[in-house]
Image (cartoon, rainbow, N blue to C red):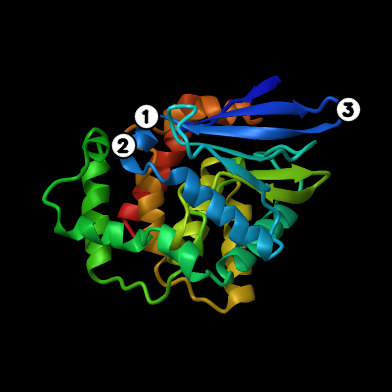
Amino acid sequence: MHLRRIEGGLGCTTDVLGLRGADGGGRDVVLRRYGPWWQGVNREVGTQELAALRLARRAGLPVPEPLWEDRNGLFGEPTIVIGFVPDARPVLEPRDPWDFARQLSAFLVRLHGLDVDPDTAALLPDLPAAFEKLATLDEPSRSLAAHPRGRALWERACQELRVTTFPERVFVHNDFWPGNVLWRDGQLVAVVDFEECGLGDPAQDVAYCSTDLRYLGHHTAADDLIRRYRKETGRTLATLFFWELVALARPLPDIARWLPGWQLLGCPHVTADELRARHAALLERALTR
């Protein structure tokens, strides 16, 4: 039985289903279907996400239960079923930014400390390797070139990449932002959407989350997230600036395309022009650093 559509995602259709038995018992689950973009990029995305969830749950991390993968092509696109987390929702406007940052940092510390087994590691992409190809390109991508400052951002990222090394590979979420974190009564109860995960630099997740917090206007929480993570792990995050440049490039050519999803997730007050202005300010600060 179809209960509702979970709106807000860009690359995946997500629906809540109610499974009921003849005896009246049952449970609610989430059906995730990866659309055309994923089929052209990674048809094993469902297998990869389920493996990531199993890895995280074995370690006791708060993530949905992996239940089923459509191995027989019933849906015509990569499809999985995972557990539903009841009475939980994303929080984009936290009442307590310090506690918000504390819990986000604590999750990342645990996530980046996972011991990845060989079978799971074989399924995961090497994320920094994909970005290392940037330094060999002659032109920026179309999405960057379409933005007035996109070429300058690309050139700065390439420049930074030429002097950057990635000394370790850990399990990273690679889309860790407040919209993918579920809360209940002020407590982090689940992190979702692991379809972009891989083996990478821990600074990736820290940069992406802190940059999104700044887009949302939560500069104090962003700074505290970085500070807490450094203190709790002992990592200097020497590559943080490079990944901040990557984070600034992700919404191009127009960050306003993210706004409908943010509004659905509980951030109705930010306008498209305001969001563009926040992104532009962060971009200019990075380019003049």
Query: Viewer-proximal residue, 189 or 29?
Result: 29
Alpha carbons under labels 1 and 2: distance apart: 7 Å
Write the residue at 49% across / 28% down.
74
Q: Is residue 54 left or right of residue 43?
A: right
Query: Viewer-proximal residue, 105 or 56?
Result: 56
Which residue carries the number 1 mark? Answer: 36
Image quarter of the N terminus: top right
Which secondary structure, mark 2?
A: helix
Write the residue at 57% across / 79% down.
234
List x then y, in percent, for residue 231. 62, 75
Which labelled disc corresponds to residue 129? Answer: none
- Closer to the chain start, of discs 3 and 1, is 3
Query: Viewer-proximal residue, 32 or 168?
Result: 32
Q: Amino acid at mark 3?
A: Asp
Q: Amino acid at mark 2?
A: Gly
- Please tell me how crowded label 2 is: few (under 14), some (14-19), or many (20+) other residues with Cα within 10 Å: few
Q: Amino acid at mark 1?
A: Pro
Which residue carries the number 2 mark? Answer: 40
- Please tell me how crowded label 3 is: few (under 14), some (14-19), or many (20+) other residues with Cα within 10 Å: few
Q: Is residue 152 left or right of residue 198?
A: left
Which residue carries the number 3 mark? Answer: 23
With respect to residue 220, does 37 lie above or below? above
List x then y, in percent, for residue 160. 27, 64
